[in-house]
Image (cartoon, rainbow, N blue to C red):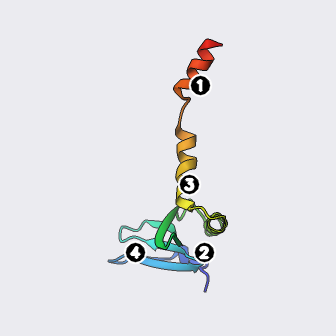
Amino acid sequence: MPLADVACRNAEPDKTLKKLSDGGGLQLWVQPSGHKLWRLAYRFGGKQKLLVTGPYPLVSLSDARHARDDAKRILLSGKDPSEVKRASRVAEKSGPTFQQIADEYVE
């Protein structure tokens, strides 16, 4: 049964990790410290993997479901969603390369 936003909001921390499942591999992990994180459990290359979507209040239930659907589309194309996410983060953070600066200087 899919989660409701009320169930996410009212989830209380326990002494151990509590996992609330929404379906399709999407889970809300309630940490003993009270932090709530969206995680997507999936299989790629015969191995179980996890993809972190974000913390609960900042990432809503509908946003987490959209992220799950996007990750499933990436899986269908034969790519690992965590590698795609990592590559996009690296591309955003990387500055200009030495070659780009040298070409600009020569011009």
Tally the numbered discs: 4
Q: Which residue is mark 2?
A: 5
Q: Quadrant of residue 3?
A: bottom right
- In the rendered structure, are the residues bearing label 1 and label 2 in contact, judged by CB atoms less than 8 Å apart? no
**Gap in angstroms between the C-alphas marked 1 and 3:** 25 Å
Query: Is residue 41 in view from this perspective?
Result: no
Of marks 4 and 3, the one in the foreground:
3
Residue type indicated by callout 2: Asp
Q: Would you name the residue on which mark 3 appears?
A: 85
Q: Amino acid at mark 1?
A: Gln
61 and 23: which is toward the camera: 23
In what element is the residue under mark 3?
helix
Between 57 and 107, the one lying in front of the other is: 107
Who's the residue at 53% across and 36% down the image?
94
Q: CA distance from mark 1 to mark 4?
A: 50 Å
The residue that label 4 is drawn on is 13
Q: Is residue 42 left or right of residue 78?
A: left
- Mark closest to the chain's N terminus, 1 or 2: 2
Q: Secondary structure at mark 2?
A: helix
Neighbour tally class for label 2: few under 14, some 14-19, many 20 plus, Cα within 10 Å: few
Which mark sits nearer the N-terminus, 4 or 2? 2
Residue at the bottom extreme of this rendering:
1
Mark 1 — residue?
Answer: 100
User: Which is more foreground, mark 3 or mark 2?
Assistant: 3
